[in-house]
Image (cartoon, helix red, strand yellow):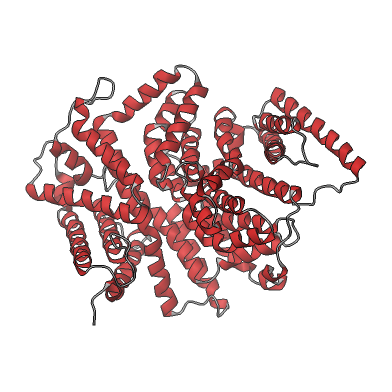
């Protein structure tokens, strides 16, 4: 029998199941392992799976050279050896005096090997951008002392760098990997069990049923399905492919252009990472870095994420009415009864949310959700877990965690260099020097920085990098901690739809068969509210549901109206087709309403009221019907 990667499938399956069972054992309340052992074992198993499942390069099926396959087996063996080295020497690593005790030759070998393997698994799972960023920081660590004043550091010993990267829990095994090996994996597992129980299919069917009579319905299906699915997947490109393969062809079928269809799916999928109750993986990391509870993060993100999706819904509705785009085809609408009798599939989400509200830890909430899935699955044959299906859920959990864990370990390299060289403080000083006392200029600088550092990089490591560099600068300027972290979090996410490197938009364009850059430009237009809101909630905490009830109610009402106005101005349609001068009036009026304040609210309401009255009068004169309901 010919030896190939398929031959290794049973071995890979065994390691995948082992990884998930180890996670259940180490984070599910069965035991408390020492931190280095838990993280090193997790990363070792992740590296083994990447080398077994993902070839170094793309080959035609069966065309992978045998030497490359054998090399991957050797790398998998080395990954296990690195994990075993940390586990066996755990006591010595904990007792050593940092930067005082000598670094042995074996420490050097294992540490350098670990860094190289982490960079390689990141390249295989997420591509080159994060690898390039990490290598740039490593080069800065080695040669930064030769740079001009203001950028240079004092020079660091190679032994100190290796110790920071490998022999402590401040580098590869640092906070990012801790999140990946803890709460993130637990929620990835929750999503995998929902998927293997066929419960996640309800999201798409429910979206189709809710939008069955709405004009431009397929695009609205994309919004609802992506918002629901995105809370489970936590990855914008994965979300695009998870729901877009169904929604994008439907959108094109009823009349949306290919770039618009791809952009709608990209924007809807990206928003899933900021949509409570289960946001993207970066939100769990934020809870650690910001020193607050995940429930507080979800609460702060609730209104901004609602406004994000409301703006997208309004814009695609106005597009549908303006261009007379059709409804969802009858053959795609599931029977109402079949959806209603499956609504109890949402109970695991309800159980998870209830556990959060009751103050349970994030990891235990995820396991409660998984337990609910297992219990509820027994009531129908289509959801019931057989041994094979249960094993498949364990495998899928491991497979879906590979990219996140790889990238978090790689982000640990960046964090280690920032801490060791002090470049974070230099960055803060540089940005604050440019901005001076002008908070708006500081926000603009950090917005640009966040989007540049996030381009092509998965959300979690992108957020870690910009939070390490940018959030302290905002806190220093007097911005509340949660608002500072949410600001950079949003722009790290939005880099997925921001040209020139907009991976979510490129994924949508690929499915739609559209021009990638045109799809990216439309994505920015559709997601424009998300680009504006972070500035607003820095100045107006009420948008993050912080403050007095009256202020919160006013902020909710005015921001909702403002979002509709902005959507109408951008799409050129509100109650009727807009005249040229009405579009900026609607957009600016909407913007004024989002920025909560008595004067701005009056200006915004006046602008929107004026346009509404004029368009209603035009509509009555032409006897054109009012725009159909959303």
Is residue 40 visible in this depiction of the protein? yes
| Screen quadrant of the N terminus | bottom left
Residue 401 figure quarter? bottom left
Q: Is residue 469 above or below residue 619?
A: above
Residue 585 in picture, x, y percent from top left: 73, 29
530 relative to 11 in the view: left or right:
right
Is residue 358 visible in this depiction of the protein? no
Residue 10 figure quarter? bottom left
Residue 200 in picture, x, y percent from top left: 55, 65
* Rendered residue at 39%/57% (across/down): 185
429 relative to 481 in the view: left or right:
left
* Rendered residue at 57%/45% (across/down): 523
Query: Considering depth in this image, is 615 or 391 the residue closer to the camera?
Result: 615
* Rendered residue at 80%/42% (across/down): 576
Q: How many marks?
A: 0
Residue 227 in picture, x, y percent from top left: 58, 54
* Residue found at the far bottom of this picture: 1
* Rendered residue at 48%/76% (across/down): 385
């Amino acid at each position: 029998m010919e030896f190939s990667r398929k031959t290794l499938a049973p071995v890979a399956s065994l390691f995948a199941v082992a990884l998930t069972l180890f996670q259940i054992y180490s984070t599910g309340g069965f035991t408390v392992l020492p931190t280095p052992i838990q993280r090193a074992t997790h990363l070792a198993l992740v590296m083994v799976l990447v080398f077994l499942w993902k070839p170094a390069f793309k080959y035609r099926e069966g065309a992978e050279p045998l030497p490359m396959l054998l090399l991957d087996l050797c790398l998998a063996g080395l990954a296990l050896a690195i994990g075993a080295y940390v586990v066996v020497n755990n006591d010595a690593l904990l007792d050593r005096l940092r930067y005082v005790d000598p670094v042995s030759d074996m420490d050097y070998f294992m540490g350098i090997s670990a860094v190289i393997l982490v960079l390689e698994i990141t390249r295989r799972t997420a591509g080159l951008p994060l690898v390039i960023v990490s290598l740039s920081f490593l080069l800065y660590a080695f040669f930064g002392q030769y740079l001009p004043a203001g950028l240079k550091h004092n020079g660091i010993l190679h032994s100190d760098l290796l110790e920071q990267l490998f022999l402590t829990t401040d580098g590869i095994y640092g906070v990012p990997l801790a999140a990946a090996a803890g709460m993130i994996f637990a929620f990835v597992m929750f999503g995998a069990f929902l998927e293997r129980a066929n419960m996640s299919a309800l999201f798409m069917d429910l979206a189709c049923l809710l939008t069955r009579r709405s004009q431009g319905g397929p695009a609205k299906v994309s919004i609802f399905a992506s918002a629901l699915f995105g809370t489970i997947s936590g990855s914008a490109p994965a979300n695009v492919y998870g729901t877009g393969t169904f929604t994008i062809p439907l959108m094109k079928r009823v009349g949306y252009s290919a770039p618009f269809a791809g952009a709608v799916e990209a924007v809807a999928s990206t928003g899933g990472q900021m949509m409570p109750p289960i946001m993207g993986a970066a939100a769990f990391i934020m809870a650690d870095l910001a020193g607050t509870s995940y429930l507080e993060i979800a609460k702060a993100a609730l209104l901004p994420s609602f406004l994000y999706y409301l703006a997208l819904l309004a814009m695609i509705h106005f597009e549908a009415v303006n261009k007379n785009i059709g409804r969802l085809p009858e053959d795609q609408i599931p029977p109402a009864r079949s959806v209603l009798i499956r609504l109890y599939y949402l109970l695991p989400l309800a159980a998870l949310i209830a556990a959060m509200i009751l103050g349970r830890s994030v990891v235990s909430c995820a396991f409660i959700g998984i337990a609910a899935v297992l219990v509820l699955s027994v009531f129908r044959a289509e959801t019931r877990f057989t041994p094979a299906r249960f094993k498949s859920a364990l495998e899928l959990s491991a497979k879906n965690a590979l990219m996140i864990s790889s990238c978090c370990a790689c982000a640990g390299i960046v964090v280690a260099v920032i801490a060791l060289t002090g470049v974070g403080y230099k960055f803060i000083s540089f940005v604050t020097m440019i901005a001076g006392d002008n908070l708006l200029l500081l926000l603009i600088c950090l917005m640009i920085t966040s989007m540049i550092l996030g381009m092509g990089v998965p959300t979690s490591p992108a957020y870690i990098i910009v939070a390490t560099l940018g959030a302290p600068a905002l806190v220093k300027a007097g911005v509340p901690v949660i608002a500072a972290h949410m600001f950079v979090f949003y722009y790290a996410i939005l880099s997925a739809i921001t040209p020139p490197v907009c991976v979510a938009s490129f994924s949508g364009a690929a499915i739609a068969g559209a021009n990638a850059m045109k799809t990216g430009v439309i994505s920015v237009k559709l997601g424009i509210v998300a680009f504006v809101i972070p500035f607003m909630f820095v100045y107006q905490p009420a948008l993050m549901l912080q403050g007095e009830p009256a202020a919160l109610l006013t902020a909710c009402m005015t921001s909702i109206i403002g979002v509709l106005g902005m959507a109408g101005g951008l799409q050129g349609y509100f109650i009727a087709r807009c005249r040229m001068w009405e579009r900026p009036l609607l957009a600016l009026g909407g913007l004024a309403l989002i920025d909560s304040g008595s004067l701005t609210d009056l200006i915004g309401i006046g602008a929107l009221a004026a346009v509404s009255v004029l368009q209603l009068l035009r509509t009555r004169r032409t006897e054109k019907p009012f725009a159909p309901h959303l």
